[in-house]
Amino acid sequence: MDSKCRCWLIYLILHLIDKGSLQDPLEIEGVVGDSVILPCSYKERVLNPDERNVFWRYNTHKNVYDIEKGKEVTEDQDAVFKDRIESFPLEYKNGNFSIKLNHLRFTDNGEFFCYISKVERQYNLRLTVRAPPPTLSPPKPTADSRSSSMKTQQDGIVNFLIAVLEFFVLHYF
């Protein structure tokens, strides 16, 4: 490979790394029915309102949420995300374009992308939605009508009386 070709290859690799194309996605976990914050921010400099163009996408093609010139735009939002996204407009001036995804579903598993167009910055996030932890159910009744606490208490009394009886037999007889 000649030096000119190597230079172009190195340039291409560095360019891709700089754009974040090769970055590993940030792993986010959530539980069905709960909410998660999907982070996206730009802190290198303050963006003017007309530079605050941020596009959130799911699996590269579904429109999750758009911010254009510092204003929320939801008219092209995919129906899957309608009424489930919250953003923080007061934070836009600080470079925070994070969103909150509410009412998580298993179908939300996948890749989310936040693209800040004026500075060509992209963030990749991978969301994993898990089932809620199982809830403890009360113990099932047994054929014996006494509750388990009553059995334990009575068994404890019987054991205590047996121990007292053994003590007296050993020490006094």
Image: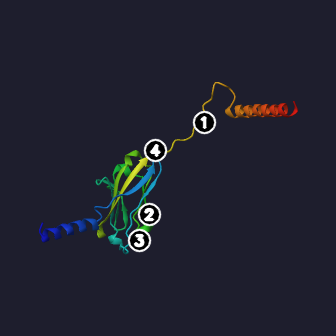
Q: Which mark is residue 138?
A: 1
- Sort mark 4 into few (<14), some (14-19) or many (20+) by Cα contacts within 10 Å: few
Question: Disc 3 marks which residue?
Answer: 93
| CA separation in Å, label 4 and label 1 | 21 Å
| CA separation in Å, label 1 and label 2 | 42 Å
Please give the name of the residue rendered at 36% of the width and 72% of the height, measured from the top-left corner.
49
Say whether disc 3 or disc 1 marks the residue closer to the N-terminus.
3
Please give the name of the residue rendered at 37% of the width and 67% of the height, measured from the top-left corner.
70
Viewer-proximal residue, 2 or 43? 2
| CA separation in Å, label 3 and label 4 | 36 Å
Say whether disc 3 or disc 4 marks the residue closer to the N-terminus.
3
Q: Position of residue 100 (x, y in %)?
A: 43, 57
Question: Disc 4 marks which residue?
Answer: 131
Question: Disc 2 marks which residue?
Answer: 88
Say whether disc 1 or disc 2 marks the residue closer to the N-terminus.
2
| CA separation in Å, label 3 and label 1 | 51 Å
